[in-house]
Image: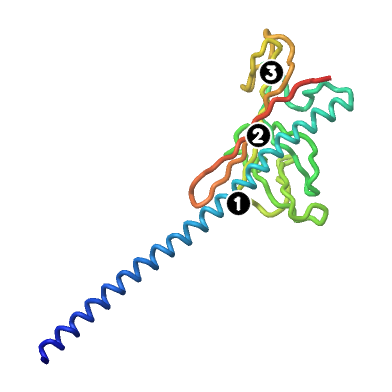
Amino acid sequence: MPRLIRMARGQSLIELLVAMVVIMIGLTAAASFVFSNIRLQEISSDRVIATNLAREGVEYAKALRDSNWLAGNAFNAGMSAGSGATADYSAVPYVNTSGVFQNFDFTPNTIGTDTNYTKIVRSSTAAGLGMYIQGAPGGVPVTGTSTSFLRMVEFGPICADGVQIGVNGVDCTGHGVQTGVHVTSTVVWTKRGTQRSSVIVDELYDWR
C-alpha cells in the first residue's frame, strides 16, 4: 500500500509540471496575441494619418488650380518651377504654423534626404495648435513637434497628345500645350525599423 501512495505522489508532480507547461504556453500565446494586436493598431492608425496627409497634398493642388482660375492665371501656375531643361516638378506644400497652405516649394527633390522640407510636424503655436504643418521657408523648417511622416508632391504635365511627363528637366515641348497635371502625393514613415508609404494619385485638368 505505501508503494502505491508513492506512485500517486509521483504522478501528481508530473501532472503539475504538465499543467504548468500548458499554462505557460497559453500565457505566451495570449501575450503574443496582445502585442501583435497593439502593433497592428499602431500600423493601422499611422496608415490612416498617412493616407489623409497624402490626400491633403492632392487637395492643396486642387485648391491652387481653383485659385488660379479665380485669379485669371493659367490653371497650372505654381505647379512647377522653371521649364524645359530647368523644369522641376518635385515639391512640398508649405503649410505655415497656423495650418494655412501658402504655396508649393520646389526646393527639395528627394523625400528621404531633404527632411527640413519634407518632414511633417505638429504646430505648437496657438493659432494652429496640434495641426499638421510642413515646409522650410528660407531653409528653416516650421517649428513644432516632429512626427515620423515625410511628404512630397510631384506634378507631371499632361500634354495635348496625351503624353504624361513626370521627369524633372522635361516639359510638353514637342507634344502640344499642357492640358492637365498628373499629381502624385507620397507620404512615407518609419515605425519599428520598417519604412511604409501611402500614395494618392489624381489628374487635374483645365475644365474652363
Quadrant assignment for the C terminus: top right
**Which residue is under mark 1?**
45
Give the residue displayed 64% in from the left and 34% down from the top.
Answer: 200
Give the residue displayed 73% in from the left and 46% down from the top.
Answer: 133
Count of numbered badges drawn on the protein: 3
The percent coordinates of residue 56 (x first, y second) are 71, 39
- Classify mark 1: residues with Cα within 10 Å, few (<14), some (14-19) or many (20+): few
The percent coordinates of residue 110 (x first, y second) are 60, 34
In this rendering, does residue 132 appear at all?
Answer: yes
Quadrant assignment for the N terminus: bottom left
**Which residue is under mark 3?**
158
The percent coordinates of residue 198 (x first, y second) are 59, 39
The percent coordinates of residue 103 (x first, y second) are 78, 35
Q: Quadrant of residue 150?
A: top right
Disc 2/disc 3 C-alpha distance (Å): 16 Å
Give the amino acid type for the residue marked by disc 1 in the picture.
Answer: Ser
In this rendering, does residue 113 appear at all?
Answer: no
Q: As displayed, is residue 186 above or below residue 126?
A: above
SS of the residue at dot 3?
Answer: strand
Q: As displayed, is residue 22 above or below residue 147?
A: below
Q: Residue 185 carries which label?
A: 2
Q: Give the residue at the far right of this rendering.
A: 71
Q: In which quarter of the image is residue 41?
A: bottom right
SS of the residue at dot 2?
Answer: strand
Mark earlier in primary sequence (2, 3): 3
